[in-house]
Amino acid sequence: MNKSEYQLLRWSVEMHIARFISDPVLARDLCNELMRKFVQSLADSHIKRAAGKRSFRTFRRDKEITVPQWALHKPRKLSALRDI
């Protein structure tokens, strides 16, 4: 969300709040709190998404985990593959 989109959203929210609350200072304070929470949750979701992408790209097997037996096999020689 860029600055102009944020400002349009903020003004829209402030107008909707001002319809129900007659005190302009209270309406502005409420709008400030709502927009602060909105931006904070938006930033948190971006951080979680970026961390998920980063952890996917840098995946490493934990050496403490026991590997299932079916995953362990001896590598075949090239001559054994030709016979198949």
Image: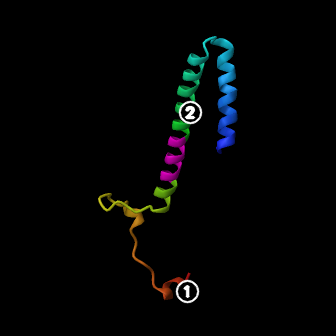
Q: Position of residue 81 (x, y in %)?
A: 52, 83
Q: In this view, does 35 lie above or below 19?
A: below
Q: Where is residue 28 in the image (x, y as percent from the top left)?
A: 59, 22
Identify residue type, mark 2: Phe
Residue situated in front as seen by the camera: 40 or 7: 7
Label 2: which residue? 38
65 sits left or right of 5 in the view: left
Say whether residue 47 is magenta: yes
Query: In the image, which residues are magenta?
Result: 43-52
Residue situated in front as seen by the camera: 39 or 63: 39
- Residue 82, numbered circle: 1
Residue for point 49% across, 46% down: 48
Identify residue type, mark 1: Arg
Could you tell which of marks 2 and 1 lies nearer the N-terminus?
2
51 sits left or right of 34 in the view: left
- The image quadrant of residue 82 is bottom right
Secondary structure under the numbered disc 1 in the rendered image: helix
Residue for point 66% across, 12% down: 20
Residue for point 59% across, 25% down: 31
- The image quadrant of residue 34 is top right
Residue for point 67% across, 33% down: 9
Say whether residue 77 is magenta: no
